[in-house]
Amino acid sequence: MSRVPGRFASALSVAVLAAFLAGPAHAERKLVYASAVGAKHPVHTTGVEPFFAKVQAETGGSLSFELFPGGTIAGGKQTLAAIGNGTADMGLLADIYTPNDLPVSAMLSDLAALGKDARVMTGAVNQTLLLDCSACKQDYLEDGVLPLASYSLTPYYFMCAKVQIKSAADVAGKKV
């Protein structure tokens, strides 16, 4: 069974708890989380849901979360706006869908796609986004959003019946 790594969960817990504690003292609060990906996506099952459970346990249930997966309240392009207008309190943002609002962050995500190992790129993107790139943070803060973590996609592969595609040259003349 996969679970949220300790340091990652602790860092996120501190960030969410700090936001929670900034509100009214001891008030119960349910945060709405919008996500465009399906309920069974690993980002939910191995990341978001265990994190939510840990935070809820650490706060004695005074902070809870409601996950709206599969674009039920906001698709990938609408999540930033949904957070901005109060439809959601938090969500899975894909900055590549909102490059006009998050230009530096979107460029960072584009660069992450050049890597060969998603685990390495996830670490590099998180370090850059959360620690080293003030322009990235400013992108989010201008929209009233605080990034907690990011991840890099795994490489895409062509699945072909008769031809192997290993390079861009192999795609030339093919219908994709």
Image (cartoon, helix red, strand yellow):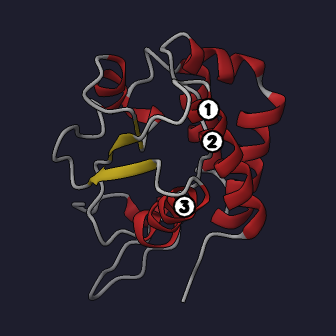
Location of residue 160 in the rendering, given as x and y in whole percent from the top left corner:
30, 81
Residue under numbered circle 2: 17
What amino acid is at disc 1?
Answer: Leu
Q: How far apart are marks 3 and 2 (CA)?
A: 12 Å
Q: Kindly indicate whether the residue at mark 1 contacts the one at mark 3 (C-beta within 8 angstroms).
A: no
Find the residue positioned furthest to the top.
142
Q: In this view, does 161 lie above or below 82?
A: below
Residue under numbered circle 1: 21
Considering depth in this image, is 92 or 90 the residue closer to the camera?
90
Q: Kindly indicate whether the residue at mark 1 contacts the one at mark 2 (C-beta within 8 angstroms).
A: yes
Considering depth in this image, is 175 or 107 the residue closer to the camera?
107
Question: Viewed as shown, does residue 12 lie left or right of 102?
Answer: right
Considering depth in this image, is 173 or 90 the residue closer to the camera?
90
- Residue at the spot 54% in from the left edge and 19% down from the top edge: 103
- Residue at the spot 62% in from the left edge and 46% down from the top edge: 149
Residue under numbered circle 3: 51
